[in-house]
């Protein structure tokens, strides 16, 4: 993909009523250097902020534009607006509560160019509140992006994505997709024939644990609904792994251990395939969950003994 050489990047940042976090995100985008051709902040109708409020709080830069929407319609709609308003052939997505490391776009552009990829995601750090950065267990990227997510248990985050305009406009950001937006986007991109690359370097920071964010216990119901939408599009073997590994794992992580193993064995029967590696992973997950429950109940018991009612 030699046409990437020398091209500018449009950065699209979606925002809703988190100005102190937005400033950090914009600073990290400006730190990418001359690759950035523009930074478009799409404000999803924050009730307490005007366009002037947002602009006055942000760093002064000719690269920066703020688009304030007249009604709140969700992050997917905000991304669509930002992509339509952008001017350059490469688009980078960034949520206002996340940030990039200074060399992110440089390494991604080179990786996309060498591999002729249409989309590149990267590994990332996690940060809960204001605590130190956490590295997820590294999972090697093998096969396709869909396999990486649904079979290998890989990690994906919207703010790591860099893509061509052609891909962004072709795949789009459906407003009805409320959860697993990053997974949905990557899988639909791959099913549509676009080339997906994954850079194992951690180049972004995913911040979670602050107000206004849908972060909490694993939502197995949402996972099941997400997978059911893809049931007729995925290869049958990949769909089997999506059920026997991804869905079953999520049920176990949410404390429903019996349901997790029921899902696993139901998938084995329905698809006439046995996945011993997946079973071992589920057993390990269940032991971790049970150990966590024991420790939590032990702490509760000790606390009651120390502070009897």
Image (cartoon, helix red, strand yellow):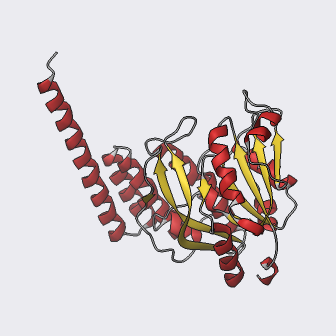
Question: Which residue is pictured at 65% across the width and 70% down the height?
Answer: 120
Question: Which residue is pictured at 68% across the width and 73% down the height?
Answer: 106
Displayed quadrant of residue 273: bottom left
Displayed quadrant of residue 157: bottom right
Residue 119 visible in rendering: yes
Q: Quadrant of the N terminus?
A: bottom right
Q: How many marks?
A: 0
Q: Position of residue 23 (x, y in %)?
A: 67, 45
Q: Quadrant of the C terminus?
A: top left
Query: In the orientation shown, which residue stands out farthest toward the top?
Result: 309
Q: Is residue 206 left or right of residue 80?
A: left
Q: Position of residue 301 (x, y in %)?
A: 15, 31
Question: Which residue is pictured at 38% across the width and 44% down the height?
Answer: 254
Say which of 94 and 38 sits in front. Answer: 38
Q: Position of residue 209 (x, y in %)?
A: 49, 41
Say which of 277 and 94 sits in front. Answer: 94
Query: In the orientation shown, which residue stands out farthest toward the left?
Result: 305
Residue 235 visible in rendering: no
Question: Which residue is pictured at 51% across the width and 77% down the height?
Answer: 142
Q: Position of residue 13 (x, y in %)?
A: 72, 50
Say which of 130 and 284 sits in front. Answer: 130
């Amino acid at each position: 993909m030699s046409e990437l050489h020398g091209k500018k990047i449009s950065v699209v940042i979606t925002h809703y009523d988190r100005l102190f976090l937005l400033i950090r995100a914009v600073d990290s985008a400006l730190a990418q250097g001359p690759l950035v051709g523009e930074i478009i902040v799409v404000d999803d109708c924050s009730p307490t902020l005007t366009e002037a409020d947002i602009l006055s709080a942000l760093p002064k830069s000719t690269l920066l534009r703020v688009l304030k929407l007249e009604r709140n319609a969700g992050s997917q709609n905000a991304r669509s607006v930002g992509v339509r308003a952008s001017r350059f052939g490469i688009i980078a997505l960034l949520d206002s509560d996340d940030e990039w490391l200074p060399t992110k776009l440089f390494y991604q552009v080179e990786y996309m160019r060498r591999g002729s990829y249409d989309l590149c995601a990267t590994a990332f750090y996690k940060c809960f509140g204001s605590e130190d950065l956490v590295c997820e267990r590294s999972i090697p990227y093998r096969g396709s992006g869909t396999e990486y997510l649904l079979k290998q248990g890989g990690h994906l985050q919207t703010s790591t994505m860099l893509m061509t305009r052609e891909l962004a406009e072709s795949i789009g950001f459906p407003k009805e997709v409320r959860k697993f937006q990053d997974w949905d986007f990557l899988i639909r991109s791959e099913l549509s024939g676009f080339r997906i690359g994954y850079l194992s370097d951690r180049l972004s920071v995913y911040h979670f644990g602050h107000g206004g964010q849908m972060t909490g216990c694993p939502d197995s119901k949402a996972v099941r609904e997400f997978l059911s939408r893809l049931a007729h599009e995925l290869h049958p073997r990949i769909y089997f792994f999506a059920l026997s590994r991804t869905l079953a794992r999520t049920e176990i992580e949410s404390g429903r251990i019996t349901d997790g193993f029921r899902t696993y064995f139901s998938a084995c029967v329905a698809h006439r395939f046995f996945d011993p590696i997946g079973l071992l992973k589920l057993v390990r997950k269940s032991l971790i969950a049970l150990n966590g429950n024991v420790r939590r109940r032990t702490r509760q018991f000790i606390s009651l003994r120390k502070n009897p009612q």
